[in-house]
Amino acid sequence: MAIYEIEKLGGIAGFGGAHLRSRGKVDSAALSADENKAIEALFSGATKRSLSSGSDAFMFRISRSSSSGNETVQVPEHLVPAALTRAVQDELI
Amino acid sequence: MNRTIPDCHGYNATERKFPLCSCFIIPRDVLERFATDRKLTDAQRESFASTAQLEKSWRRVREAHAKLSLTALAVLPTAVAATAPPAITVFDCQHSSTLPGAPVANPGSSADGTIKRAFNGASDVADFYMKLFGRNSVDNAGKTLISSVHYSINYNNAFWNGSQMTYGDGDGNIFIDFTKSPDVIGHELTHGVTQYSAGLNYTNEPGGLNESMSDVFGSMFRQWKANQDASKADWLIGSEIMGPGATARGFTCLRDMSNPAAKHCLAPQPTKYSQYKPGMDPHYSSGIPNFAFYKAATAIGGKTWDKVGKIWYTALTGFPPKPNMAMSFFADRTRTLAKSMFSSEPSVAGAVDKAWTAVGL
């Protein structure tokens, strides 16, 4: 079991900068087996043979803590399961 | 631990030699290995061998197509420019995240304002590039311009995915409909122009240049639509997509090319090269070349597309692809072009040089 911390970055407006933030958390226990499998593939690099999303597309930074330490991957939006992309909340800071 | 996921060629963004690509999901060496794998049946081995051969054939076709395009551009520029203008198509995602969505018949006369704006905006950008620069679509060979609208739910973004534009409706608070800013439409389509010309990468210095090209020609497109001189333009990017929550906080735009660090920018940017840091989001590092363009344009005066726009356009499109271009390289290229293209007006080269020097390049 793990808690995934997700941050949406980039886009034409530059999320992750001075005034725009989009973050969220998801408990792996709340995800389906397929969703957990898809996320595991991101961390293991098994989905590495994928095209980038292109210019102005969002990137997602996903972090998790486990017995082997902290792990973070940064991947294009189209590779991220919808359960994680839905979990972030856009806000002005 | 941070890991970067490489693309289908195994390159990460800074190593990539191609702006974008279309690839077989299974690499050819794997297909060939399966084709001789004795653990598989004859039929399976034959299938993998056929697929590997098909991949080779497709690669030859792609290479031949690229070679032919470059040869045609070099030998027959007028013939290429004379081909029909690009078709403009619009798809409606109906709030799903599947591209391209459902095709829209007669988008130019749609009752849906978003669909109509996406169609008219893409048509106008195609006109802009054709009339001012003689460019036929993003690839200068008449590529169909595809736009998808109503993407996802409350989606705060617009993007170019390598083959088409996609627009979100905004969340209604921070942003509203992304088709409402003409410079955003020009920005996205210019990513296509960059992809098919200099092929700039999307990280580090070439990433900042890539984003700047989209802001420069997006803003120029907006000024052209309004027939504005450089001195009359507001130089704002995304002013029409700001939602009530953002405007209530005093944010009037995403970026301001005339004052990249201003407080009214939702995404304030650096203005000097000394502030650049490797790995910086290209939407921030683009402030440096954006500011140089603004300074050159206002110093030269008149319509941006008459002089400084032609210099920037030639610097972007008039040379072989250079994905890892540094900002200083682009600056020097525009300095050289300003001298050769406007040799009878040394003030133009002087303004370009002074603009780059002012931002530390």
Image (cartoon, rainbow, N blue to C red):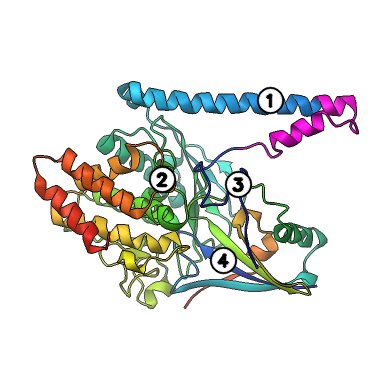
Give percent across and percent down for residue B121: 38, 46
Determine whether B5 is above or below B127 in the image: below
Residue at which label 2 appears: B189
Nearer the observer, disc 4 or disc 3? Answer: 3
Is residue B82 something that shows in the picture? Answer: no
Q: Sequence-wise, which precedes: disc 4 or disc 3?
A: 4
Query: In the displayed structure, does residue A53 sit left or right of residue B1?
Result: left
| Labels 2 and 4 touching (C-beta < 8 A) | no
Q: Is residue B43 magenta?
A: yes
Specify the amino acid type for callout 1.
Leu
Residue under circle 4?
A: A8
**Horizontal side, residue A30 vs residue B358: left or right:** right
For residue B184, above or below residue B69: below
Can you identify the residue that label 3 sits on? A51
Q: Amino acid at mark 2?
A: Leu
Return the disc, 2 or 1, that comes first in the chain's sequence: 1
Q: Mark 3 is on which residue type? A: Leu
Of tags 3 and 2, which is closer to the observer?
Answer: 3
The stretch in magenta equals B23-46
Q: Are marks 4 and 3 on the same chain?
A: yes
Q: Marks 2/1: CA distance? A: 32 Å
Q: Position of residue B178 (x, y in %)?
A: 44, 57
Q: Nearer the viewer, residue B356 or A15?
A: B356
Mark 3 to mark 1 CA distance (whole Å): 21 Å
C-alpha distance separating marks 2 and 4: 23 Å
Left or right: residue A89 versus residue B354 is right
Q: Chain letter of disc 4?
A: A
